[in-house]
Image: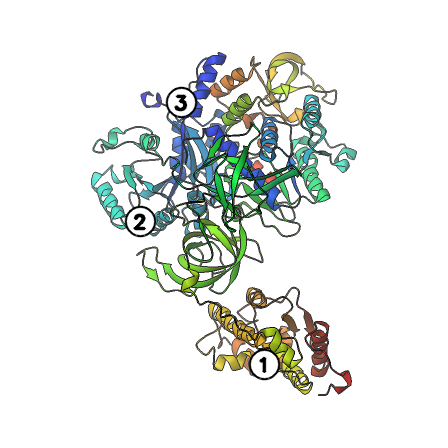
Amino acid sequence: MTKYLTHLQRLEAEAIHIFREVAATFSNPVMLYSIGKDSSVMLHLAMKAFYPAKPPFPFLHVDSTWKFKEMIAFRDSEAQRLGFDLLVHSNQEGIEQGIGPFTHGSNTHTHIMKTVALRQALDKYGFDAAFGGARRDEEKSRAKERIFSFRNPQHSWDPKNQRPEMWKIYNTRVAKGESIRVFPISNWTELDIWQYIMQEEIPIVPLYFAASRPVVERDGMLIMRDDERMEMLPGEVLQQKMVRFRTLGCYPLTGAVESGATTLPEIVSEMLVSRTSERQGRMIDKDEAGSMEKKKREGYF
Amino acid sequence: MSKLAQIDLSPPNSAAEEISAYMAEQEKKSLLRFLTCGSVDDGKSTLIGRLLYDTKLIFEDQLAALTKDSRKHGTNGEDIDLALLVDGLEAEREQGITIDVAYRFFSTPKRKFIVADTPGHEQYTRNMATGASTADLAIVLVDARQGILRQTRRHSFIASLLGIRNIVLAVNKIDLVGYSQEVFDEIVADYQTFASRLGFNTIQAIPLSARFGDNVIGPSENLDWYKGPALLQHLETVPLDSADTARPFRFPVQFVNRPNLDFRGFSGTIASGTVSAGDEVVVAKSGKSSRVKRIVTWDGDLESAGEGEAVTIVLDDEIEVSRGNMLVAPEARPEVADQFAASVVWFAEHALIPGRSYILRTETDQVTVTITDLKYRIDINSFAEVPAKSLDLNEVGVVNISTQEPVAFDPYKSNRSTGSFILIDRLTNATVGAGMIDFALRRASNVHWQALDVDKASRAAQKDQKPAVVWFTGLSGSGKSTIANLVEKRLSSLGKHTYILDGDNVRHGLNRDLGFTEEDRVENIRRVGEVAKLMVDAGLIVLVSFISPFAAERRMVRELLCEGEFLEIFVDTPFEECAKRDPKGLYAKALRGEIKNFTGVDSPYEAPDDPELHLETVGRTTEELASEVEKLLVEHGIIFNYDQSSWSI
């Protein structure tokens, strides 16, 4: 325990240590890059961990083809700015079958276009370790997960039989076909993330800031109509509203919040008085109780 | 609501300066990591749920989900069940127990907290240890109706062993004993009696009710006889160990950063002490010294850096340093040894057995080790040192460990980072144990190798052969001894010097004190391995005919010998066939239950994955099988200078 370091400095050092541990012990690691604010922080930390070298692993974006357009633009500009090795993978069979959240529901869409797509990409490149930006404060089953989370050859998580994780000693040994998901920002809270983004001036997707956007109220959520694939249902009206997003994912599954917060301090201020958690805007967590744990067992991040 | 006023829930207005001021305040807060432990149903998860709930860290949507969950899984009738806030796994909610550790985060105006909610069941002790390994303080919960239980003692002991020095004894469910001071005092006295031997710095006893919130975040009228702090006040004010900058510099090298020929830096996290540019440092394992040229970070070079910082150090010259080594202060160096004594907590179903080899990992180093001695097991109830032959799941013991390469370390008592390790099973890669190093075993106290002038090579040359161990493994009655016998006869006729070590014969002499338990079987093989090694040193071709059912022991013998000196032959005869042959009538007895631990019946046989020779015996003559062995010996250069036509039976 040291008083010499601030809270954020400690979190940063822990994350950097984890990044380096993976680079030193795995033969083929990858970072899952989902473009959201947590990914932006992860990317920044990875750049720091290996400075003056570049991160010695590629960044993989699993593209469900339903992400906000602004996310894709941001992804490509970041890859250019920082010069990291970007891989993009989509589930081609899913695309051919026309899988989408409107036609097949959030469950099927998430399973085929995210979970299955991720498994395909991991198998295709034979990655033995994959960084993810999950935080323990996000959701109950994530609070239970190790920093180094073992996956069997089918990519599934066995929550009842996790490897003990003592001190800062990580068991990174895997047999052929097995892999480990690694979560360097496990111990960060949502507030820590925002505070760090402010302190380090880390670029984030503009969708986090309030702006006038076209939204439709559906199933109690404000959905932004990002392209014409979203058809209006009877009785629905498209409205321009000042909204922003607390998390980012597939646009049909991500609820906006009405907000006037156009700066980072305003976002933080809003977050501090909020009475709902950030994941509330995600359809994926609502389908059934324990749904995150179930998805993780199937190989979701 | 007045007791909530102290809680951090109303941020200032949205003005940028005020937010910055608020953030700056957040940054100044200290961090306390603690865990809750104790027996099943003592209310650990409920207490954490209560802390989160009362400090207003539960969001509306989470509360709505909790209310729904409580109706489905809750144990409090109509009331919400706060434990469901932390028991995040489906199996946990269904069974109403905690299986694995959950990490939760909360903060008050004074401090930030990371809390590990750990399981109470004995079978999940390893998950409790996981939570304790990174904690500064432990809240030991006791159910006021039950008093001190076995798990209370076990968890207190493990907390102490892992170096936790601050304890809160939370006497929970005090409402269920009528808020009785007498009950409280009795439990506190009981606890202090046994905990006096555990070396805690502080033990703060607090009566409370997690379910109703008495004494959790503020004082309770129901407990007016209690004059001490409420739980949260204590957690906010308990002094933390600050970084002791006087501790010697330790920098375990994690990663060598070499993007191009002009840059070579050593990346890692400083485990203790401080370092500045220009300082002399020593490479722990080689003793070579150098100077720190730069301390590199993305934010610019640093003049100096201290404990907990993740940096990259560039040295003045090109001395050899790789992952697993340590840069250290020249005037206070760590131990570098290949034998040490350590306390071990065992996590696996499969027991720790002396003689077995495992992979040992420290923060950055990895080495193959053998447990050379299990000195004793520690009885959780009496804390007595009990002689033991093995360490079972969740047991704690003290062992001697011998490593294949020297490792650099400090005693755990002086440095948690450089004095700790985990043990990994070599086959499954599971983490099977955690250890804390006590002290190095001095070479001087061991037997030194006598350097001899006549060596293995010269003795072998005299015999015109290459010495080796030919290891026959297989079920009882598979034909090992029969084949080995014939091979020896043939080798002898070629003028080769051989010896057969046979399982049954050795058990009549050298190993007559050993039975057939797993521990004894391991020791049996260890001794035979050592004898075979001496014979190889004498230049002999040693034919060993042993069931040797466990892969770990066969590998141990392989590693005793030099490369190419160990040839494993799997005599593969199906169980049914062996049982049918049954030359000694043993299968019949075992199947009737008259012999215990019989391989293939009630004790497993682990077939070799990759033997030098796999002999399937069914339908083949002993002569054919022996010839295959001879062919193997020729291929491996064990026998040479012979005339094939002279082979005879």
Q: Is residue B636 above or below residue B384?
A: below
Query: In 3D space, how far apart are the residues under numbered discs 2 and 1 (Cα atoms)?
Result: 53 Å
Residue A62 placement: quadrant: top right
- Please, what is the three-letter code of the amino acid marked with disc 2? Leu
- The reply to whether discs 2 and 1 touch (Cβ–Cβ < 8 Å) is no
- The residue tagged 3 is B8
Please say if the residues under marks 3 and 2 sit with CB atoms less than 8 Å apart.
Answer: no
Residue named by callout 1: B500
First of labels 2, 1 by sequence position: 2
Q: Alpha-carbon neighbours of circle 2 within 10 Å: few (<14), some, or many (≥20)? A: some
- Tell me which amino acid carries mark 3: Asp
Q: Which chain is home to disc 1?
A: B
Please rate how many residues cluster around mark 1, counting C-alpha atoms within 10 Å: few if below 14, some from 14 to 19, many from 20.
Answer: some
Q: Nearer the viewer, residue B296 or A22?
A: B296
Total marks in image: 3
- In this figure, which residue is indicated by the disc labeled 2? B198
Q: Quadrant of the C terminus of chain A?
A: top right
Q: Real-space Cα distance between discs 3 and 1? A: 77 Å
Image check: A261 left or right of B79? right
The quarter of the picture where the N terminus of chain A appears is top left
Please tell me which residue is depicted at 72% across the width and 87% down the height of the picture.
Answer: B648
Residue B211 lies, in percent from the top left, at 35, 35
